[in-house]
Amino acid sequence: MTQLAWLIPVFPLVGFLVISLGNKILPKQFSGVFASLTVLASFILSLAIFLQSPETGETVFVFDWIKSGGLSIPVSFLIDHISLTMLLIVTGVGFLIHVYSIGYMKEDEGYSRFFSYLNLFVFFMLLLVMGSNYIVMFAGWEGVGLCSYLLIGFWFKNTEYNNAANKAFIMNRIGDLGFLLGIILIYVTFGSVSFDDVFSAAKTLPDNQPVITAITLLLFVGAMGKSAQIPLYTWLPDAMAGPTPVSALIHAATMVTAGIYMVVRSNILYSISPFTLEVVSIIGMATALFAATIAMVQTDIKKVLAYSTVSQLGYMFVALGVGAYSTALFHVTTHAFFKALLFLAAGSVIHAMSGEQDVRKMGGLRKKLPITFAVFAIGTMAISGVPPFAGFFSKDEILARAWTQSPVLFFFLAVTSVLTAIYMFRVFFLTFYGTFRGTHDQEHHLHESPPSMTIPLVVLAILSTVGGFLGLPTVFSEHHFFGDFLKSSLSTPGTMLQSEASHTFEWTLIGVSIITLAGIIFWAFNHFVKKHRIPAIQETEFKPVAKLLYNKYYIDEIYQSTFVKPLYSISNFFWKIVDNSIVDGLVNGVSKSVVWAGQTIRLVQTGNVGFYIFAMVFGIIAMLLYNLVF
């Protein structure tokens, strides 16, 4: 069955080609159904291979791609427990989002184009997680960046959306340059880009080799761009310009976790570079806390979820930084469930509100949208870490790992966890409780979403409820199914077992978490429902700290002043002075001199034969004199 793994990315690629080429002749509804079926086929095949669960990784050769001298790069796929985990997430959650999109995008004029882009994205994402070498991974890496650009700017008639797409594309190129340089350095160092060759050679190296530190830092720059870490994070909140299913698929469940996957896949390199792991931990911690504070005061429901995604990605990088690779991938899995659920539920709210995204103009929707209300509640509890929902187990595990490595990391992650619960219950109560604050026309058209949208929501809600039981803490079970499953595929499985938090600490953490969450829920309900506290409408009404957070610490403005405007000034200088005046001046000067010379010399052509004879004689005499003198 493993030898058929090459079909997994082929199915969505076929979907993309059929929908793109047959767009003019195929029925509109065919696109959504066919695109969904191709991803379902990939999921079924992935599940079939997963059920076989090969103990060791198997490489599936497809064809030779690049051969030059000693360099040989085939298109081949590595099927092991790490890639299988990602395959099930990408195809499983991807299928649910495709089905949801059938209802959400039903009235859009670009319906078929949208599904062709989704299929192309799934193809490249599968290429990224299945590749057996860094070049195939990089091809998928660049491909998802392209699809992200196309999907963020899907409604391209809106200039702001185009700007958001450009921003995402350009910021990711910065990270991708670091990733590409890292791959080049890997080839220079190891003479290969194949995972098997590189990791086998790396196992023999001592810790803290400068070249390995350089490689891992460069690869991490790529991860910072793709997974939206400081300072390359500002593209992701703006990427909410795309349709909501895009936010769920690309910017919550799959693409932004590519950086996490890449570090997990390269875990042997990172494990022998403790310095890089410290950098990863610090960047992850800073990003988690930084984004959580911004989310506290945002009023756009999708922007809150966007900054929440940035924050949760920071959590995952902290797990990577402390060497808990399986824990990071565990949180990737649970996060895919509850964050996709939250985005799609937000899309259901926006669908019912005729496109409105401001939570200050919602309220009281639980009666009109009972299914959306229930699943959003589950998603909120899951991301906040309320037991027994999925987020509780994975976040608890990250906190426990952080405690064993650094109480400072633990403290800041704990603060971030509290902030997460506050801003999520803030959004939940503002959206679904109280009185409706929108227009009369919006209230008149409030309705629950169609089954094509609600069924995926229910499935994701179930996964968000039970998904955490894949990794029970040691106080509940000695067997960690998720960690045990990944152990054979991790080159350094011992890193996640180097130090375990005591049972006393685990019980204390669980107890304090439950009490804290209960207090936050009570406060949020009392503040936003009982006292009807609605966030300020005008920015001038904000207090200084709230205004700072609402404007995202003015980071975009700082980038604009520090990087964008100087680059524009330099570009204008080279355009107007160097290009127009000097380069074009020289080229145009040559052409003008030729024209002038032609216009001047033609005056000699008078047609007078006597003058021509005189000129010939004069020329002969001049040449004779020249020869006599010189």
Image (cartoon, rainbow, N blue to C red):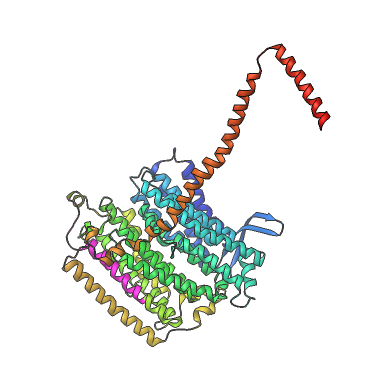
- Residue 419 lies in the magenta-colored region: yes
| Magenta span of residues | 414-439
Quarter of the picture containing the C terminus is top right
Residue 10: percent from left, percent from top: 53, 53
Residue 65: percent from left, percent from top: 64, 54
Residue drawn at point x = 34 percent, y = 75 percent: 415
**How many numbered callouts?**
0
- Residue 92 lies in the magenta-colored region: no
Residue 66: percent from left, percent from top: 65, 54
Quarter of the picture containing the N terminus is bottom right
User: Quick check: can you spot residue 125?
Assistant: no
Quarter of image, res 586: top right
- Tell me if residue 541 comes above or below residue 316 in the rendering: above
User: Quick check: can you spot residue 521?
Assistant: yes
Q: In the visual, does 424 lie left or right of 581?
A: left
Between 69 and 598, the residue placed more toward the observer is 598
In terms of secondary structure, what is the magenta stretch mainly?
A: helix
Residue drawn at point x = 32 percent, y = 78 percent: 513
Residue furthest to the front in view is 629
Between 455 and 517, the residue placed more toward the observer is 517
Residue drawn at point x = 17 percent, y = 60 percent: 435
Between 561 and 66, the residue placed more toward the observer is 561
Quarter of image, res 625: top right
- Tell me if residue 229 comes above or below residue 589 in the rendering: below
Residue 190: percent from left, percent from top: 65, 67
Residue furthest to the right in view is 628
